[in-house]
Image (spheres, coloured by chain):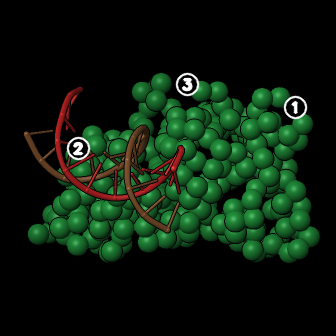
Chain colours: A green, B brown, C red
Amino acid sequence: MPPIVIPSAEGAHGVRASRSRAPRPDELDSIAWLASLTDAERERALGDLRVVNVQPGELVCRIGRPVTYWFGVLDGLLKMSSDTALGVPITFTGLPPGGWFGEGTVLKREPYRYNIQALRKSVVAGITAETFHWLLDRSIGFNRFVMNQLNERLGQFIAARQIDRLTHPDARVARSLAALFHPALYPGVGELLRITQQELGYLVGLSRQRVNEALAALEVAGLIRVEYGGVRVLDLAGLRGYAAADVAA
DNA sequence: TCATTAAATTGTT
DNA sequence: AACAATTTAATGA
């Protein structure tokens, strides 16, 4: 497994430090909460904001590591999971562009409670825990964003538990897709979710073939359209309630 | 910009 | 797991 990638605020020395860079202007535009800051607050945030490119399979943060950054996905796709080594029930959550995570652990200054791993080449941004708290202490807009993030994520985990209990593969795929399309948590996703069927398989815990089959079924049902390297959602509500509709039919 | 080639992804067995 | 077909990305004229 590749080494842990931690963006450095200093960028002064070391292998890790050399991997992080300043964000590009177009990348800044994709960070939703920046718009809710005052000019002074934004200046501080921008000075602290680092960006790092991660390769498939790389760990962005690992269980038990001390919290250093609050992370956001600018491009690509990450997956969040509880530890696999202990045989604990594994819950996967996909993190598409626009998603920010780790606020719970940064808030409490606890070690990370889950692994974040890149499913494909991705761009990850981060601000230090210090700046995160600095913003939390004075920016109303930032607090709104974080609070909404926490609230929405709670709903995500409840949905994830339901997904785990579903046995029908098509339903698992449908609900997982619905979760990834969450407009409040992942504003960067838009209409088209860039995800390969292989990646979706890793996320849902199914083989690529079965995912392919499930996607075909969902397309026939008129809920999505399968495209090369991605899925276009036509009926988000339909995806969320797919199992119920299936059982009722 | 276009044509060619390589790589990635998909659909099927 | 392996294969062929399709789409995208990369390369160079």
- Cα–Cα span, label 1 and label 3: 23 Å
Q: Residue shown at 68%/35% (left/top)? A: A5
Q: Amino acid at mark 3?
A: Met
Report the residue at 29% width, 67% height from top: A225
> Would you say residue A84 is visible in this rendering?
yes
Q: Which residue is mark 2?
A: A209
Q: Which residue is mark 1?
A: A13
CA–CA distance in space, label 2 to label 3: 26 Å
Occupied quadrant, residue A59: top right
Q: Amino acid at mark 1?
A: His
Q: Quadrant of the N terminus of chain A?
A: top right
In the picture, measured across the screen, residue A34 lies left or right of residue A100, that is right
Query: Are dots 2 and 3 on a single chain?
Result: yes
Residue A169 in view, yes or no: no
- Residue displayed at 18% across by 61% down: A217
* N-term mark: 2 or 1: 1
